[in-house]
């Protein structure tokens, strides 16, 4: 679980701001859920035989009533619970997003933490393939807006539950023929949740997984058609993709379209964003059946990826650092600072006194492009001296409006 210090905080703000701007462009609206839910919500939705539920949840007992509670490992279950609890679907389909920390008890490594952050998107109540395509196209726009180029889209379809059952039988037969090649986890899953064998991260298992039968051969016609239409929409939007028949996702609730955005730049933690359709979940959690589609992006992994890109994250520096000396100057400095902020400038006002020289040193390290200097002379005239800090130019005496205009013009 990490602290995010101010130096990294600018990138976090940039990422969140850029992504949320995109989400709003597509009409998604914010929802916030608690960090803690009843344990059974996650067991029922994510699935008993998944990495998350088997070994990654932070679960504890409520001291008062003995309830089993869990720090949320992901947001979809909580979001659907909230939507059902507040009957949001009565008003029609919903496009929702949330962001915040998730908790999984994993072995920490680069790109894998025990408290990490997701921005999650859920589109509830939409049946057609257009919404699958919309959320994917929206991701592509986010990457462009962030300046991220090294991500590739992989898609697959899991079909309907019958198709999965047919496939499951074929897969189990195949795995049983190759029992000696299975690792311990996979042997256990063979009887509990064989599809998850395909999701194994064990390199030794990869050849076996490569050669496994493919779900696409068992697909039902409506799912195939749905998948074709998603692909058509992606082509129409100029979003390139690769079909990965082994993409099954780690959670049980998915059906039909699943997708991942992967990068080659982050080693083993290659997936920065993952999602798909989960038409059964709303009913499974007690609601009137409603289709759904969504994804979650890993903020830490996207930030790591952003760091590998050529374009630096715009770092936030104040427009001006305001220095002042003398009693009259101090009184006017307050007014001046507020008026400059009124003109949309970011103003850091020097606090704590000291000589002009030491204050100007602070102004310099603040990164501000200008110092606003106020002595008693300026205070009497109700003007400020504007001193460029990043170029060798003379300081000029201006009224506040002129100063603000000049600073704004000098913005990069
Ligand atoms: P992985 O296969 O890497 O364990 P997952 O399938 O468990 O990922 P999801 O539950 O789909 O991941 O979560 C969506 C995204 O959240 C992932 O693609 C990843 O970017 C991010 N993520 C998941 N777990 C972690 C973690 N422990 N630390 C940091 N980011 C994570
Ligand atoms: Mg995982």
Image (tube, helix red, strand yellow):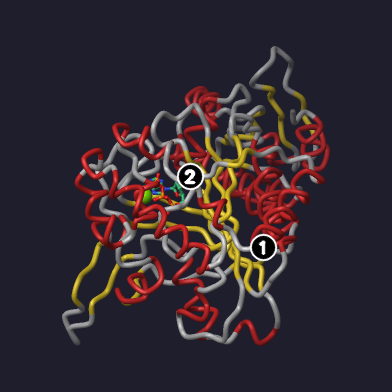
| Nearest to viewer (mark 1 / mark 2) | 1
Question: Measured along the vertical axis of the image, is residue 193 above or below residue 162?
Answer: above
Left or right: 75 in relation to 135: left
Please provide percent x and percent y for residue 240.
70, 37
In front of the other: 56 or 260: 260
User: Quick one: label 1 or label 2, which is nearer the N terminus?
Assistant: 1
Residue drawn at (66%, 73%) of the image: 94
Determine which residue is flagged by label 1. Answer: 221
Residue drawn at (69%, 71%) of the image: 126
Left or right: 39 in relation to 273: left
Left or right: 308 in relation to 91: left
For label 2, the crowd category at 10 Å Cα-Cα, with few meaning under 14, some 14 to 19 and many 20 or more, is: many
Q: How many marks?
A: 2
Task: Tell me where residue 219 sits by quadrant.
Answer: bottom right
Q: Decide if ligand 1 comes within 8 Å of the CB at mark 2.
A: no
Asked which secondary structure carries label 1, the reply is helix
Kindly identify which numbered label has been placed on residue 246. 2
């Amino acid at each position: 679980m990490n602290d995010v210090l101010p130096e990294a905080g600018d990138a976090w703000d940039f990422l969140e701001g850029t992504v949320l701007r995109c989400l709003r462009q597509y009409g998604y609206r914010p929802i916030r859920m608690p960090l803690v839910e009843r344990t059974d919500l996650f067991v029922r939705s994510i699935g008993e035989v998944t990495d998350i539920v088997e070994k990654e949840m932070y679960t504890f007992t409520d001291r008062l009533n003995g309830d089993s509670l869990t720090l949320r490992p992901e947001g979809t279950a909580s979001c659907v619970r909230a939507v059902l609890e507040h009957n949001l679907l009565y008003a029609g389909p919903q496009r929702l997003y949330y962001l915040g920390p998730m908790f999984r008890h994993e072995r920490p490594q680069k790109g894998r933490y025990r408290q990490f952050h997701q921005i999650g998107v859920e589109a509830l109540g939409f049946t057609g393939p257009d919404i699958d395509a919309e959320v994917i196209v929206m991701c592509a726009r986010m990457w462009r807006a962030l300046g991220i180029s090294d991500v590739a889209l992989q898609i697959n379809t899991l079909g309907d539950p019958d198709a999965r059952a047919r496939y499951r039988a074929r897969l189990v037969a195949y795995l049983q023929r190759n029992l000696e090649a299975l690792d311990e986890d996979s042997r256990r899953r063979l009887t509990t949740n064989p599809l998850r064998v395909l999701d194994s991260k064990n390199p030794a298992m990869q050849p076996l997984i490569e050669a496994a039968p493919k779900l696409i051969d068992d697909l039902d016609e409506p799912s195939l058609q749905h998948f074709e239409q998603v692909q058509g929409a992606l082509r129409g939007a100029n979003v390139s993709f690769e079909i990965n028949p082994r993409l099954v996702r780690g959670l049980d609730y998915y059906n039909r379209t699943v997708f991942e955005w992967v990068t080659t730049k982050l080693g083993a933690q290659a997936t920065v964003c993952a999602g798909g359709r989960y038409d059964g979940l709303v009913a499974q959690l007690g609601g009137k059946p409603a289709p759904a589609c969504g994804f979650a992006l890993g903020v830490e992994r996207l930030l790591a990826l952003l760091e590998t890109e050529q374009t630096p994250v715009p770092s936030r520096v104040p427009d001006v650092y305001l220095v002042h000396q003398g009693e009259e100057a101090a009184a006017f400095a307050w007014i001046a600072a507020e008026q400059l902020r009124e003109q949309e400038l970011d103003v850091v006002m020097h606090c704590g006194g000291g000589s002009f020289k030491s204050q100007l040193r602070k102004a310099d390290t603040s990164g501000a492009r200008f110092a606003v200097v106020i002595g008693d002379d300026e205070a009497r005239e109700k003007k400020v001296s504007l001193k460029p800090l990043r170029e060798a130019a003379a300081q000029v005496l201006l009224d506040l409006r002129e100063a603000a205009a000049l600073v704004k013009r000098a913005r990069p």
